[in-house]
Image: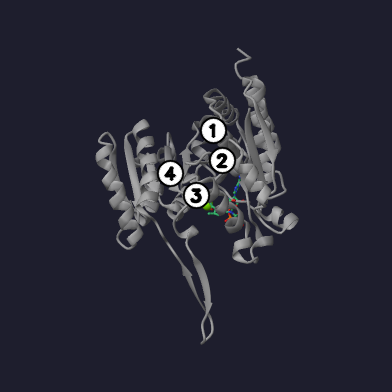
Amino acid sequence: MYKITTLPGDGIGPEVIAGAVQVLNAVRERTGIEFAITEAPFGGNAYDQTGTPLPEATLRQCLASNAVLMGAVGGPKWDNLPVHLRPEVGALLPLRKKLAVFANIRPSMVFSSLVDASTLKREVVEGLDLVVIRELTGGLYFGEKRREQLPQGGFRVIETLEYSTEEIERVARFAFELARKRSGRLTSVDKANVLESSRLWREVVSGLAAEYPDVELSHILVDNCAMQLVRYPKQFDVMLTENMFGDILSDQASQLTGSIGMLPSASLGGQVGLYEPIHGSAPDIAGQNIANPIATIMSVAMMLRYSLDSEEGAALVERAVSSVLGEGYRTIDIMQPGMTQLGTSEMSRLIAQRVSEAGTTA
Ligand SMILES: NC(=O)C1=CN([C@@H]2O[C@H](COP(=O)(O)OP(=O)(O)OC[C@H]3O[C@@H](n4cnc5c(N)ncnc54)[C@H](O)[C@@H]3O)[C@@H](O)[C@H]2O)C=CC1
Ligand SMILES: CC(C)CC(=O)C(=O)O
Ligand SMILES: [Mg+2]
């Protein structure tokens, strides 16, 4: 019996997690896979209830699970708290660190029925299928930060960016292995013309290349990469980069698919897998039943594949999403003329229904 912890979090988090759980339950009925789901407080709502965004009991429960499914955290209500109490810094970052999930997989794949939903030209995105591997437990987000008051007025802030050879090597191996299973092409993204951490990054990644003679490795500077991603994204297959660059580039890559509401993620490397949509809590649309649940539902597919050992379940979910989109159903962020607009819960219910029906009709 697998143990799954859900952390709905804040903003649209609870709405998209509710939809994903519905789909997961449909997979259970269809495949017989056995799991127990337990929800736990996490993020801003946990701070409101308990005074901390990452309660000890939530962390313990996550560590004792096979997989954790997270919605999103944060929002204006908590933006002015001291930094260690803010949901992003006080809950999400420490959770990733405690779970030791150093490799964050963010696939950006364009569904054939959504080719014209992208703001880019059809020929630029048609057939696009790339993956960003983002280092997730090091770099600037985890470095020491400090704010000092200056005698003449104003402040001085210090943020620290640290990477060790070992941290770079383990995530780079992960990316080489994935590239080997896919096209054999790996692009490492850095800022080696300026940052010492990027120079080490490039040295370590280049040093591994000899062990993967079947993988064609190239390096690109992050500013050029951002431009190439919207110019000709099909030049990329597996992209490897550090934490902050991966955060930014994956949001950018999501728009190639039509919407940030489409992009799932899996964070691996420790005993427990962490699964989450790449988007945030979207306070601007929270509580309106209009958020796209597909990023979270596709994260469930990744969870079935990587943590629950159910390729069958993963494929059921992916096919259900593809089929619903192919039938012309859309949430507002990917709406196109002539299609049928659905809310978050209706879209989730329809995908769950397609999972339930799979293979039962001619
Ligand atoms: N993993 C997490 O929990 C993350 C949390 N955040 C937090 O979320 C809050 C909002 O941050 P933003 O910068 O606005 O980023 P965001 O990703 O929440 O939203 C950016 C834009 O995309 C739209 N969007 C996001 N998810 C969507 C979905 N599923 N369907 C349709 N539209 C969607 C939003 O409505 C908004 O216009 C902040 O407090 C931020 O710190 C931001 C990123 C990740
Ligand atoms: C706390 C942030 C690093 C969350 C975020 O933007 C992300 O992981 O994509
Ligand atoms: Mg982000």
Q: CA distance from mark 3 to mark 1?
A: 24 Å
98 is higher (above) or lower (below) than 210: below
Q: Which residue is mark 2?
A: 275
- The tag on residue 251 is 3
Name the amino acid type tagged 2.
Answer: Tyr
Check contact, mark 1 vs mark 2: CB within 8 A: yes
Q: Left or right: 98 with respect to 166? A: right
Q: Which residue is mark 4?
A: 132
Which residue of the protein is positioned furthest toward the bottom in this rendering? 152
Image quarter where the C terminus lies is top right
SS for callout 2: strand
From the viewer's side, name the closer residue of 362 and 29. 29
Q: Residue 119, how many percent across, how many down? A: 49, 46
> Looking at the image, is mark 3 or mark 2 earlier in the sequence?
3
Name the amino acid type tagged 1.
Answer: Ser
Q: CA distance from mark 2 to mark 4?
A: 15 Å
The answer to which quarter of the image holds residue 324 is top right
